[in-house]
Image: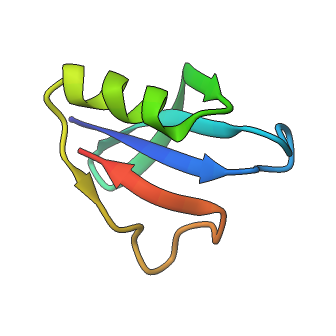
Amino acid sequence: MISVWAVYDKPTDYPDRFVARRYQIAEGETTATEDVMISTDIEIIHHFMQKLNLFRTEPFENDDKKIIEVWL
């Protein structure tokens, strides 16, 4: 199982925030978890991801267009 955090810029449910949502990928299935981080400052989200020793990558080709980065 792999955990992936997707960071959204102004998603529909939080139109004035950055939102990081954690997904689990296992056996070809992607499942949203209840883990969410919401902030007006992207640097706060970056700091949190770095403390988890994750690294940033570009969104995947088929990702929602509001996803600005992915952390693995």
Which quadrant is the N terminus positioned in? top left
| Outermost residue to the left | 53
**Coordinates of residue 23 in the picture (x, y in percent):** 44, 37
The foreground one among 57 and 25 is 57
| Outermost residue to the bottom | 61
In this rendering, position of residue 19 left or right of residue 5: right
Q: Quadrant of residue 48?
A: top left
Q: Is residue 52 above or below residue 19?
A: above
Give me the residue at 62% from left, 37% from top: 19
The foreground one among 12 and 28 is 12
In this rendering, position of residue 16 left or right of residue 36: right
In this rendering, position of residue 64 left or right of residue 2: right
Q: Is residue 12 above or below residue 34?
A: below
**Coordinates of residue 18 in the picture (x, y in percent):** 64, 40
In this rendering, position of residue 64 left or right of residue 35: right
Which quadrant is the C terminus positioned in? top left
Give me the residue at 47% from left, 47% from top: 6
The colour scheme applied to this rendered structure is rainbow
Give me the residue at 73% from left, 38% from top: 17
Give me the residue at 62% from left, 66% from top: 64
Q: Is residue 61 above or below residue 43?
A: below
**Coordinates of residue 70 in the picture (x, y in percent):** 37, 53
Q: How many marks?
A: 0
Q: Quadrant of residue 38?
A: top right
Q: Is residue 65 above or below residue 10?
A: below
**Coordinates of residue 67 in the picture (x, y in percent):** 56, 60
